[in-house]
Image (cartoon, rainbow, N blue to C red):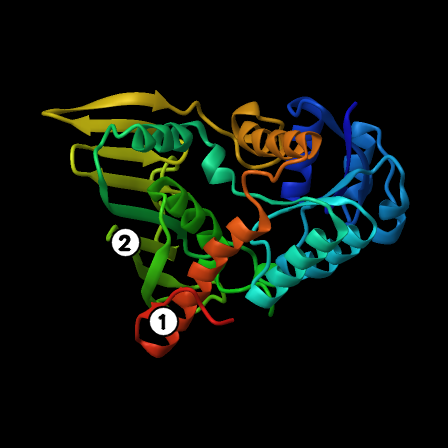
Amino acid sequence: MGLGFGVVGAGMMGRTYVRALRHMVGGADVVALHGGTRAQALADEFGVPVEPSLDALLRRKDVDAVLLATPTQAHRDQTVAAAAAGKHVFTEKPIAASLAEIDDMIAACRSAGVRLGVNAVTRYRKGMRLAKQLVDEGQIGEIRMVRHTYGHVQGNYVPDGHWLLKPGAGSPFLDQGAHCNDAIRWVVGDEVREVYARYARYTPGPDGLSAMVTLAFERGVLCSIWATYELPSPGLDPTKWTGDYLFVGSDGMLDVQYRGTTRLGKGDSWETLYEHPPVDGSGTVFDPNFVYAYADQVTEFAAAIAAGRAPEVTGEVARKGIEIGIAADRSAAIGQPVALPLDA
């Protein structure tokens, strides 16, 4: 079986990770669940026990690592508890909504000698991974500019009363920006040094937010992000709603649709290099074309533990993306650019 995971949380992401562990992750499996009203049904589907408390899950000798598919507000305390029990931790994004919480999580895992990994699934979509490879190979020359767009139809982000709308979850941009901030920083291969953001709310719903965010990188790359949760129906092309990236270099361009095509623009033409297969991302069925990216990052995390090395996306790496999101929130509040790194 290899590494035994205890999964905490049984919502859409909990189901996704359990399916990934059981069907697509080599060298690891789910051995127990805890938390959520749907935990028993999920446990019955996969033939694993449900533990009545986090402490009970952490006492299990067959649990080597915990996977936190829980609300952002719970990540800090759950990570500290897991580290104290000697368990490795892989957590959903955002790792946390404040730098102080993230620092507590990093310190707890470092002190206990366990690994801390974080969901950065955009890196693991095949089109984005190909784009990173091509940029690193110099296929578009020196990268200069980045444009990113994502949009949700008004009222379709989360339902009223959802934990994402409660204190401690961070802004909608911090939540979804955890993905794009990390992916853009990863492809560019440099650090953001200034963030300037303007936010607007055009609709009355609690999740109403539209954001225009500019990132300035240390070596001169400029990035523009348009993020909105207020599109009218029918919204954007479904291959684009979670991410449309354009990377502009000195010798070419890469157009990356998150779950669509990856195209290289060079010379006088565009060439399609990859086309993502159709995806059922509802979470109601097991779709390998949706789950594979989650499985690949957990496989990498398990391999890192086996090899005694840091995972690709550590707490420190994830912190960088959240810091950008916090800086955007602050910039929008004061109407001025915010320099990075932040003091706290």
Q: Would you say 38 lies left or right of 259 here? A: right
Residue closest to the eye, 104 or 277: 104
The residue lying at 35 percent from left, 68 percent from top is 339
Q: Which amino acid does label 2 sit on?
A: Ser
The secondary element bearing badge 2 is classed as strand
Residue 20 x, y percent position in the rendering: 65, 29
The residue lying at 89 percent from left, 41 percent from top is 60
Mark 1, residue position: 332
The secondary element bearing badge 1 is classed as helix
Callout 1 environment at 10 Å: few (<14), some (14 to 19), or many (20+)? many
Q: Would you say 103 lies left or right of 114 here? A: left
Mark 2, residue position: 224
Q: Would you say 253 lies left or right of 198 here? A: left
Residue 27 x, y percent position in the rendering: 71, 23
**The quadrant where residue 274 appears:** top left
Q: Residue 279 carries which label?
A: none
Distance from label 1 to label 2 (Cα)? 15 Å
